[in-house]
Image: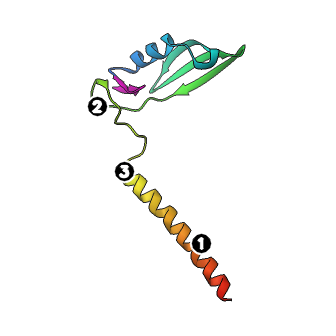
Amino acid sequence: MKLYNSYCYATIDEVAQNIASAPLVSGGIIQSATVSGQSISIDYIYQQKNYTALVTPPDCTELGFNSSFTGISTADAVELSGLCVLALALAFGVKILRRAL
């Protein structure tokens, strides 16, 4: 099952069909959406130029609307913010030590 636009689809083919049926924002037009493994290749025209985008929808566990995917887990967010605080504390410590010299 794959998550796209807060909706969990049964197959990646259904996601591709949903993408192909929607127009692109700002006047661009989607030409096709084809499945390639676990990704979807989207061909579209924007301002009279052809573009291709590759989209890899994340997995989900329950069919229907699902807005629980945040892209980063809470544990990862806590670890990353802890590392940022450590880097700032070290920079502040170096600044204080330079004043003492």
Which residue, given by chain and number where applicable, does mark 3 sit on? 74
Q: Is residue 98 left or right of residue 7?
A: right
Residue at x 57%, y 78% (from the top left corner): 93
Residue 17, image quadrant: top left
> In terms of secondary structure, where does tag 3 sit?
helix
> In terms of secondary structure, where does tag 1 sit?
helix
Please say if 2 is above or below 29: below
Answer with mark 1 or mark 3, whichever residue precedes in sequence: 3
x and y, in percent, of residue 8 in the image: 34, 25
Rendered image: mark on residue 91: 1
x and y, in percent, of residue 66 in the image: 33, 29
Give the Cα separation between the discs numbered 1 and 3: 26 Å
- Circle 3 Cα neighbour tier, 10 Å, few/some/many (<14 / 14–19 / ≥20): few
Q: Which residues are drawn in magenta?
A: 1-8
Closer mark to the observer between disc 2 and disc 1: 1
Q: Quadrant of the N terminus?
A: top left
Residue 65, image quadrant: top left
Type of the residue with mark 1: Ala
* Relative depth, front residue between 59 and 67: 67
Rendered image: mark on residue 61: 2
Answer with mark 2 or mark 1, whichever residue precedes in sequence: 2
Give the Cα separation between the discs numbered 2 and 3: 18 Å
Give the Cα separation between the discs numbered 2 and 1: 43 Å
Answer with mark 2 or mark 3, whichever residue precedes in sequence: 2
x and y, in percent, of residue 76 in the image: 41, 53
- How would you classify the magenta stretch by its main secondary structure? strand
Residue at x 67%, y 84% (from the top left corner): 99
